[in-house]
Amino acid sequence: MKAGALVHIVAIGGTGMSALAGMLKERGFRVTGSDKGLYPPASTIIEKLGIQVEISYSPDNIPRDVSLAVIGNAVSKDNPEVLEIIRRKIPYKSFPDTLWEYFIQGKTSVVVSGTHGKTTSASAVSWVFYSLGLDPGFMIGGVPLNFNSNYRLGNGTFFISEGDEYDSAFFDKGPKFLHYRPDYLLLNSVEFDHADIYRDLEHVMSSFTKLLDIVNPKGGVAAFGDSINVRKLIEKSKCKVLTFGFENTNDWVIKTVNEETGDVVVNSRDGREIKFKTNLFGKQNIANLTGVLLLADIMGLNIEKASKSLELFNGVKRRQEYIGSAKHIDIYDDFAHHPTAVKVTLEGFKSRFPQKRIIAVFEPRSNSSRRNVFEAQYVESFDAADLIILSEPFNKDALDETVRFSTNRVTSNIKKRGKEAYSFKDVDSIIGFLLGRLRENDVVVIMSNGDFSGIHKKLIQAINFNKTIN
């Protein structure tokens, strides 16, 4: 496809698709798109790029001179635009296939995967490579604060991708990460997730097995060895694999972590001592960053310079992101939605603020968290919080009651563990309750993979206007 050709993106409003639109435009292509609605941050990106987007799906949205259609994974085969694309015999691709063909192919492919920690780790890899002058390209599912963008073309020889195990499109039900054909892989913990497309853990493991099988034999894998599932996956790897984690069986062992100063010491099996300093907190993030350095070491990069660069890594939007304070009450936002992610996120906050009350506010919003498949795990996920508030599942009526997450049931079971927990139907009710319970020096951690009806700013405004909180 030549520069100047027109690409139409069906379902352009997602984080990945809006970033792909920006990349295509920077590469010299013209871009149009459509979606049912546009919301920040995608709407901000698209507006800045000046891309024409239709807020509906219609055959009339597809330009006459279109050369390629990119179809999102949430789009069904009976979508009116899909039917028109097929009728007109317009070439079409999935998001990951497009990313491979026009941006990854021909470069050294570095993929970051796993159930948890992908976005933070991929962002840190990108920052380390950038700091070392390697001018990498990247595509990430969140926005690294060091770049303020989730994509970058880069002129160097490396491209870093967040390897998602979710399916690619209605015509390609395989996971996205198989399209990225990694030369090097950073593999974080693996467990059951995405209950809407995966049957069980074995089904998830089969996808990751395929990923390990296609890693370049001349490349390498940095794997989180504390995960028993990861240990199983790497047993038959065809390339070099080194493990990292807190357990002494790993090739790189995290020995000491100073939560106050952010200083971390890692010992390698070959007798080296690797030190780094970070602004991030919690065991999950320490493990993520250790994996980044191990990957850099496997790739032959300067590990001392890579370690120093992490001190300037600021993290990712919506991952332990400080939103603001009101009357000495701190409000944080986090993308956590899987029960393990909720657990390690709250444990991280408790270890960082041991003398403060941790208030957890959680919205079940992802396709998995809205289902009852993880209810038992969620009951244990909030142990590090002092006060727990659960909202009703997002768009709950779209799910049959027999498979839907029950806020009342989970709240009741959390209380049986001796914790203070409450459930509410909407954001206004949550804020009203919090105004009567919050006190100075509390830390409020709001967790959702969506906008949660703007609760963050609404809560700050309400606290500031409330005269009962001093």
Image: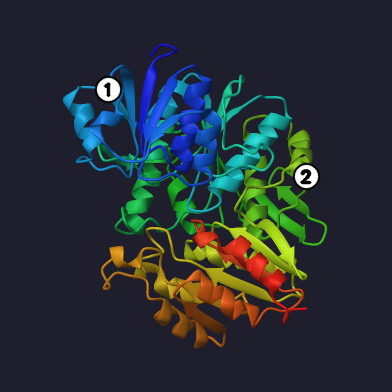
Dot 2, crowdedness within 10 Å: few (<14), some or many (≥20)? some
Q: Nearer the viewer, residue 25 or 106?
A: 25
The answer to which image quadrant residue 94 occupies is top left
| Residue 21 position in % (x across, y down) | 46, 30
Numbered-mark total: 2
Using the image, determine if residue 463 lies above or below residue 36.
below
Q: Residue at x 68, y 54 (%)?
A: 286
Left or right placement of residue 249 versus residue 408 in this view? right
Using the image, determine if residue 84 lies above or below residue 424.
above
Quadrant housing the C terminus: bottom right
| Residue 350 position in % (x across, y down) | 69, 70
Residue receiving disc 1 = 91
Three-letter code, disc 1:
Pro
| Residue 469 position in % (x across, y down) | 73, 79
Quadrant housing the N terminus: top left
Q: Residue at x 60, y 47 (%)?
A: 120
The disc placed on residue 315 is none
User: Is residue 297 in sight in this rendering?
Assistant: no
Provide the secondary structure element on which disc 1 rests.
loop
Instruction: Name, please, the residue furthest toward the top.
Output: 2
Q: Tell me which numbered mark, 2 or 1, is placed earlier along the sequence.
A: 1
Q: Residue at x 77, y 61 (%)?
A: 259
The disc placed on residue 311 is 2
Using the image, determine if residue 27 lies above or below residue 434.
above
User: Is residue 223 in sight in this rendering?
Assistant: yes
- Structural distance between the alpha carbons of marks 2 and 1: 45 Å
Q: Residue at x 19, y 22 (%)?
A: 88
Three-letter code, disc 2:
Glu
Q: Nearer the viewer, residue 376 or 322?
A: 322
Provide the secondary structure element on which disc 2 rests.
helix
| Residue 93 position in % (x across, y down) | 32, 28
Q: Nearer the viewer, residue 17 or 55?
A: 55
